[in-house]
Image (cartoon, helix red, strand yellow):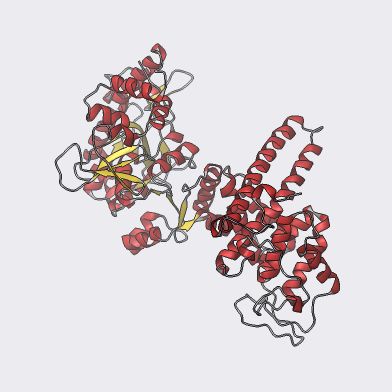
Amino acid sequence: MALSPQWLDELRARVTLSTVIMRTDKLQKAGREWKACCPFHDEKSPSFTVNDQKGFYHCFGCGAHGDVIRWMTDQRGMGFMDAVKELAAEAGMEVPAPDPAAAKKAEKRASLIDVTTEAQEWFVNNLKSGDGREALDYLRGRGLTNQTLRDFGFGYAPENKQALAGALSAFDEQMLVEAGMRIATDDGTKYDRFRGRVMLPIQDARGRVIAFGGRILGKREGIAKYLNSPDTPLFDKGRTLYNLHRASPASRQSGRVIVVEGYMDVVALAQAGFEDAVAPLGTALTEMQLEMLWRMVEVPILCFDGDNAGQKAAMRAIGRALPMLAPGRSLSIVRLPSGMDPDDLIAKQGPQAMEKLLAEPMSLLETLWQFERDAQPLDSPEAKAGLKKRLLDHVDTIGHGDIAALYRRELLDLYSAYAFPPRPPRGNGQNWRGNGNKGFGKQRPQGLSAEARGQLQRAMSGGMRDTFKQAVIAGLVRFPEEISRHSETLTRLARFEPNATELVESLFELAETLDSGGANAISDAQGLPAPPADRSYAFLREGTDPVDAREELAEAVSLLVERPALEAALAATVGRFDEDPEGSMAEQARLRQSQDLLNKRLKAFGRRKAAPLATKESTSAPNDQSADEMKMD
């Protein structure tokens, strides 16, 4: 019976490892993990850990390691299929019926591993022979030690089209082709794929040789410097990470995993003491490879070369990762000095230079912002608008609603601070006060214009049916320095709701004229009404920490503009129905799902703002509103 990797992964996901282990052994909660004295060896202090999120147990004392199936076979002594059947029954899964085709495929894979294993031994022996002298000199010239050469299994493929076929004559010719070791042309000619190259084995997660990478010696016109095995029944480059079998146990000790561009970078890092490094194999990181990395750690570190190609590779990886982001699951990025790869940096500045970079990686969001900001000159309004569009296009690819909203807000804040820096003092005698409000606490020789005062008075005194918008406007009046911070978002509100244009303009005027250095920025003496009676929002309550108030106000501003933006996008999609019915319907479904998520966030925001009042006393003021009572017309 052959069980697919996908089916086994589903089984592991449905069974909680700690629950299975606690049937026979006592576990104690330790943060997000469980701890116990190891059941596989005698010890007095616990070194055995169980991680349900990653689905494995590990003992730092004896090295015992495995998943829930391995636990059943090693600790309870069950056969593999017996363990699978018991776990499947517990998980409510049906064990697949015997599949002759799958069994035959598994048998073929096993036989092909015999081919690659013997080929690896032959390559290693070649490196030790006279034919491999040039290759060995090259590797030692790169500073690799004999221990590193042994650990990573370096070898040599001689410059001979039929050498490997002769050395592996015990295997059928077709098996050599299927394993990727030989090439068969249309006219029936067959020859060795790897010739005149330093060879490096590529291994699966269990350490079995499944493919090879080869580097050419010297420079040859028209010949690729690096050559990898093609995809075979053993090897899928999009589902394989080089050095995973070594990096996985090392990452459990370090709590990190480093992703570099190529396998020689991995080798250089390992020799310098960084054993938790992996590399993709000739392609950008795939979705499957990202999932493999996230099973190891929550925030893998991408460490690509400091040249343009390296930065573009990092952005390709970020583009793949954005739709897959989830709470606690992200990427961080290390930017190497320009023109350097890890090998160069370690050789010139030592391992401590690499350790320093790894200790202070950039976040995914910060990398995204800096890359797009520096992508082209921003010397015109059109170029700045292009920057904003690129940032929001990235945000639109994020699948998780809350994460997308947070990215949108933070990127727009960065954009606004860059595109609309604080205005310098005017030369008309106005005095800008250093009161911690970033330049917006200046004294005003004149009050607000009558038009602006009237707009704000109507907005804050209940003149609008939208009580949520009323509260946000009151919050911005109370913290006028926040108006400039959210100027771009407020401009979008005016664009989507033309009726709000004059109100937004009044807020901008307020930011320049209101004296917020007094005890209360909202007062009748300044020509403005008192805030709404409902002060259940943190940004309207006296005594709330200003940092908390501003943070909640920022979230409220973002929510306020997100609804009309979605409505406008939905209307535009409906208008395209005649031209593209299928695409329009799909886009409508996506936007309506976003609307549902937004409504949930609005209700959650309302419940959160009401919570302090509920705990303060059981008899709230009559004008307090619950989330469901908020009018969001």
Q: Relative to the observer, which residue lies in front, 58 or 263? A: 58
Name the side, left or right, on which 626 lies relative to 572: left
Residue 550 in the image, given as x and y percentages of width and height: 60, 65
Q: Quadrant of the N terminus?
A: top left
One can see residue 241 in this view:
yes
One can see residue 414 in this view:
no
How many marks on residues? 0
Image position of 52 with respect to 328: above or below = above
Image position of 623 with respect to 589: above or below = below
Residue 326 in the image, given as x and y percentages of width and height: 51, 45
Name the side, left or right, on which 467 lies relative to 402: right
Image position of 347 with respect to 54: above or below = below
Q: Relative to the observer, which residue lies in front, 606 or 152? A: 606
Tell me where residue 110 sits by quadrant.
Answer: top left
Residue at coordinates 37% horizontally, 40% vertically from top-left? 242
Residue 325 in the image, given as x and y percentages of width and height: 52, 45
Quick one: which residue is furthest to the right in this view?
Answer: 451
Tell me where residue 178 sits by quadrant.
Answer: top left
Quick one: which residue is furthest to the bottom in this view?
Answer: 429
Residue 107 in the image, given as x and y percentages of width and height: 33, 18
Name the side, left or right, on which 291 lies relative to 164: right
Name the side, left or right, on which 444 lies relative to 259: right
Q: Relative to the observer, which residue lies in front, 597 or 290? A: 597
